[in-house]
Image (cartoon, rainbow, N blue to C red):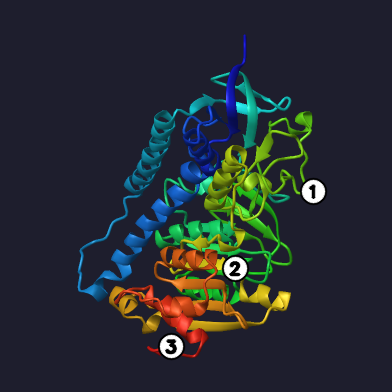
Amino acid sequence: MAANKHDLVIIGGGPGGYVAAIRAARLGLDTACVENAPALGGTCLRVGCIPSKALLESSERYWEAANEFNRHGIKIGQLELDLATMLKRKDGVVRTLTKGIDGLFKKYGVTRYEGVGSIPIAGRVRVEGKDAGELETTHTIIATGSKSATLPGVEFDGDRVGTSTEALSYTEAPKHLVVIGAGYIGLELGAVWRRLGSEVTVLEYLDRILPGMDSEMAAEAHKAFEKQGLAFQLSCKVTGVKTKKKGCEVAVEGADPIACDRVLVAVGRVPNTDGLGLDEAGVKRDDKGFVRVDERFQTNVKGVYAIGDVIGGPLLAHKAEEEGVACVEGIVKGYGHIDYDSIPGVVYTHPEIASVGRTEDQLREEGISYKKGVFPFMANGRARALNDTNGQVKILADEHSDRVLGVHIIGPRAGDLIAEAAVAMAFGASSEDLAYTSHAHPTLAEAIKEAALAVHDSQIHI
């Protein structure tokens, strides 16, 4: 049977893959996307970013009803958790968005193939599964993302010991949940189940939580999470997990084992290159398994590109999206750009934590002279009205040029506020630019303006 021909075939229908496909189709390329799962959207949409945020939102509202409504003069009767309905809502959010991507593919003429894609040689993509066959293509983009990393001595059983995928669908709140890893994923899902009544213990190999984030913000977050009831054991090496009839036992080096009901392993992610045939095609990877690419996202094999988690860097959905667009525009227009210095990161706990640019730790290590401005939410009128005053905004600016080098926020709606900082950095703004831009009152964004004023010791409201 003759191979179907396309200008571009993308392997992977996650944030990087489906965004690249839509952009390519809109630029006039005959585009196809190969995705193994029946639903498009990848890990992020199906079993990651979106369902976790749905549960974070629902669990926070439940916790607020139990602990905060009375401060607003709202009295309720007996509070009851309907976990089945909460999970159903989460699944509905995911289903709606995956159908939306299907609709976009149809709208822009992207051909969808369901199956596992591999590259036998440059210019060919083999599909195994529902839509089995071979595709002929001028360009191929690998966008297969990442998968949960494992630990020696820890075996997933898909039930009591699992990854974030399982933790998104527990049918009842565990009495005691042990989370291995104090990064974004572990803390977000740990927070969900703590709010819903679980005892949660977080085990972290390092001596701090949120590795890679500004250490001052991480320390403040640590205190906030402990007040919420999360227990932490830092500098802790997990050596194994045993499943028993009524639970699990987590072995820790130099300490007594920890008994619990369930174990969530959240120790990072590794590139998902299983079954791609990269060795067969001659595509090179680094010593950690990430696909090597040049500045145009092309691998060492001409016509074969890679984007997103599979090439390393920040393993973030929006980073993959930006790379997908830049890669496609490079193919069509000869030039595609992405500003890695202005890619934000957000932890959707309460308080939210958001960051863009360099941390204070990095600036010290690099020997860069900087100025700092800090403003607490406790002095912000909107935060007072929300009854959510924990946290602060920190702005780091070059000592000589005043150009913004990094912005770090812990507090209410930090994930939304960080966008202003990312735009400012992308356009090379100074802290003075932020300080003398009018911000509506009363808003949380005024805290950014005040932190920028504080860089110059000119803050008004503190």
Foreground residue, 23 or 19? Answer: 23
Residue highlighted by disc 2: 213
Most extreme residue toward the front is: 333
For the residues bearing labels 2 and 3, Cβ distance under 8 angstroms: no
- Tell whether 408 sits left or right of 121: left
Q: CA distance from mark 1 to mark 3?
A: 48 Å
State the residue position of label 3.
459
2 and 1 marks in contact (CB < 8 Å): no
Q: Position of residue 394 (x, y in %)?
A: 51, 78
Which residue does the image show at 39% across and 89% down from the upper left? 460
Q: Which residue is mark 1?
A: 287
Residue 199 on image: x %, y %: 48, 62
Q: Quadrant of the N terminus?
A: top right
Question: Which residue lies most toward the top here?
Answer: 1
Viewer-side label of 1, 3: 3
Residue under the image location 47 percent in, 72 percent down? 410
Q: Are marks 1 and 3 in contact (CB under 8 Å)?
A: no
In front here: 247 or 32?
32
